Amino acid sequence: MSEKETTHSNAPAGQVSPPPEDIFAQRLGKVEDIKVSGDVPFGSRFDGVVSASESRVKFSEDGDEECRYRIAGRVTAFRVMGKSIFADVKDSSGKLQVYARKDALGADEFAKFKKLDLGDIIGVEGTLFVTRMGETTLKVDEFRLLAKSLRPLPEKWHGLTDVEQRYRQRHLDLIVNDDSRKVFLQRFAIIRGIRSFLEERGFQEVETPMMQAIPGGAAAKPFETFHDALGLKMYLRIAPELYLKRLLVGGFEKVFELNRNFRNEGLSRRHNPEFTMIEIYQAYGDCRSMMDLVEELVTTVAEDVVGTLEVPGRGGELLSLNRPWRRVAYKDLVRACAGDDWFEIDTAGRIAKAASLGLDIAPGTPDFEVTNEVYEKLVEPTLIQPTFVTRLPKELVPLARACDDDPELVDVFELEINGQEIAPGYSELNDPLEQRKRFEAQLSLCDSDCDGKIDEDFLRAMEHGMPPAGGMGIGIDRLVMTLTGVESIRDVILFPQMRPKNS
């Protein structure tokens, strides 16, 4: 860098940046100066914009150095070299270098350009050329300030170092962290791919209530609200299942809903109280229909969006999504972990054995929950490669059809990838009499805080006749985590729920 070359930053080279409040005050002063000069610090419409990447592609194809381009974006780098200035302007497609010369802009406009700060949003018009360093660059003929940035951007352009700040101020994360932006673009593409896949196979997208008088379709604690006009306590839904099954009764034979569910439970690297799920139902199918469907869906979307069926897994293990995926019974996995005699010993013996395996299980815990603790804590984390876990205890899945050869088990699967559940799928229970018994048994297990009620309207719908069906739910956030190789659910949710600061 020559003696006359300087760079814009929040502080001169080698000095500590002034406090953000000082920078804010300085930039407010610039806003007033801009107004006094007769210009506008917060501009309006800027037509004819071509993205940075598109302008670069067009120029490489036609090579016309007389063709004019208009781009708009945020200033992310600024280098003053005497009577010339190089700056990077970044939009949603990437960045493009721009080049301003005093003799081309004129002294007044060049002085205004020189006063730009990192973070300002500008519109630029000019012609493209290639520098001696081989970089496609826009020579500035005209520019306009579209939005003055009053607060400084993070100093470190390789990304925010404070992980919590990335989640709490996602806008900054997206500005400075290209990897984060890429993950979200992939998320959007995955969702588009899922919709397209299902629509091509005759599934109809529907919408069902997100505020419900009786929460159902899963065992989870709901969020409560109140409907003033009705004088009625309501709940944010924990699952759309019971309404989608009403649509099966009504004659919609292939339906899906992709939307939010809400569960008033803890926060973790795999749990957010508001999450995205897709539920899919197909009349005259069963859980094996759903296994085939989700295998094809996930592999199709992975190839189309990520471009590979091999993605990074936990602990450095490579995940292979190549079909067919492993299918194994729940009991076989538990036996392999806890011993071949697990299902032959009594409940007290199982609790004692679980303790020897490092689990802390309270006396009086129902027998099926003891077994499920072994599965969830010791088995599930080991299921890295795609695995369908089948034939679960009926107590765990009260809305599923019993296995024909064992009424104590239900004909379901849990799809496990990378040590976490991605999708449960069922052969749906369509017997309203048995469904009532299951609801009553589930209600009897509620603790004293449970406000559970049986959804009589749903049972009445079933009594009109619900076709046999296969159904499943896919956790979109966890699927995106799997396909993009990130480890925290907060990295795939734009605005994850966070604990208040200093709490």
Image (spheres, rainbow, N blue to C red):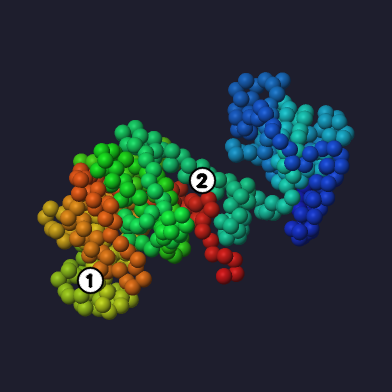
> Which circle's residue, 1 or 2, is located before the other in the chain?
2
- Nearer to us of marks 1 and 2 is 1
Q: Position of residue 52 (x, y in %)?
A: 63, 33
Q: Residue shown at 31%/33% (left/top)?
A: 202
Query: In the rendered view, does 136 fall on the left or right side of 311?
Result: right
- Give the SS element for disc 2: helix
Query: In the rendered view, does 362 fall on the left or right side of 89?
Result: left
Q: Residue shown at 36%/71% (left/top)?
A: 449
Position above or below: 503 against 421: below
| Observer-nearest of 384 and 490 | 490
The N terminus - image quarter: top right
- Give the SS element for disc 1: helix
The reply to whether residue 215 is in sight is yes
Q: Amino acid at mark 2?
A: Phe
Q: Position of residue 469 (x, y in %)?
A: 23, 44
Query: In the rendered view, does 249 fall on the left or right side of 276?
Result: left
The reply to whether residue 388 is in sight is no
Answer few, some or many: residues within 10 Å of disc 2's Cα (few below 14, many 20 plus, some between 14 and 19).
some
Q: Residue shown at 83%/46% (left/top)?
A: 32
Answer few, some or many: residues within 10 Å of disc 1's Cα (few below 14, many 20 plus, some between 14 and 19).
few
CB under 8 Å between discs 1 and 2: no
Q: Residue shown at 79%/50% (left/top)?
A: 27
Q: Position of residue 150 (x, y in %)?
A: 74, 50
| Observer-nearest of 434 and 183 | 434
The C terminus - image quarter: bottom right
| Observer-nearest of 323 and 134 | 323
Residue position for label 2: 184
Q: Amino acid at mark 1?
A: Asp
Position above or below: 53 against 30: above
Residue 367 is tagged as: 1
**Cα distance, mark 1 to mark 2?**
42 Å
